[in-house]
Image (tube, grey):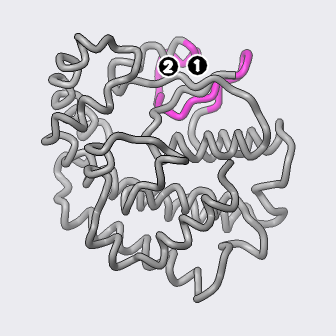
Amino acid sequence: MRLYQMHYSPWSERARWALEHHHLSFEKVEHVPVLGVPLLRAVAKRPWGKITVPLLVAGDQSVQGSLEIARWAEEKGTGEPLFPPGQDEAIERWHQVGEGLLEAGRILVTRRVAGDREAQRESTPAFVPEGLRGAVAAGAGVVTGLLAQKYGFSGVDSSTARAQAREGLLALRAALPSGARHLIGERFSYADLLMAASLQFLRPVADLYMPIGPATRRCWSNPDLAEEFADLLAWRDQIFAEHRR
């Protein structure tokens, strides 16, 4: 199996986490935004339509999207279930909350990366030779603009994105009263996994789980929101410590 991913992406982390939770072995293949799309279409055998990472290719099968990959892993792997019986609607609701959070976070992060050459250099895949990394990073501004068009946020201002993020964060806080550990029942589920990963834009999780460079960490951090929602970050860190191998 191969997982086409971006190592710093919370969407990719959700997929990696679910696959590893279910004891499934896979090779990670780093995706280059925009430039890597033809490869994705070829390996997924999808000449048209939406194509993005994370994308899992297993034999003749291709599975796109973190939620879909997690459900596939639940069916094919072993270990404790992530999708409790009868909780599909609840998990879908949390999936939508998490998507809203990450969409807002992507706007804030992408604009910071667009103005940070060192972060652009850090995001260059490891297979790019050292002598070419500067040139590749120099073109990252163009890629950033294309991503803004692709995801439809070129006209969305940062204040609107922050308001959207706070809405999702407040919903998560309301669902986690003091001392609560899980969003659904008494056991770890995909709802906990996806929401914990979705807080990456607030303050990145420790390098032990998702190693990133200092400039990338700086661009992914929102100190004021992190301070306001420090309780959620403490919950996130506990979930990672207990359930992320």
Residue 205 image position (x, y, % from top left): 47, 55
**On the rendered structure, is 64 left or right of 158?**
right
Question: Magenta stretch containing residue 209, yes or no?
Answer: no
Q: Which residues are magenta?
A: 43-63
Going by the image, does 99 lie left or right of 20? left
Q: Which residue is mark 2?
A: 40
Q: Residue at x 62, y 64 (%)?
A: 239
**Quadrant of the rendered structure where residue 195 is?**
bottom right
Q: Give how far across and how far down residue 204 sits, in percent.
A: 41, 55
Q: Residues within 10 Å of mark 2 (few under 14, many from 20)?
A: some
Q: Position of residue 37 (x, y in %)?
A: 41, 20
Q: CA distance from mark 2 to mark 1?
A: 6 Å
Q: Is residue 45 magenta?
A: yes
Q: Image height check: is 134 above or below 64?
A: above
Depth check: 163 or 113 in front? Answer: 113
Which residue bears the numbered disc 1?
Answer: 44
Q: Secondary structure at mark 2?
A: helix
Circle 1: residue type: Ala
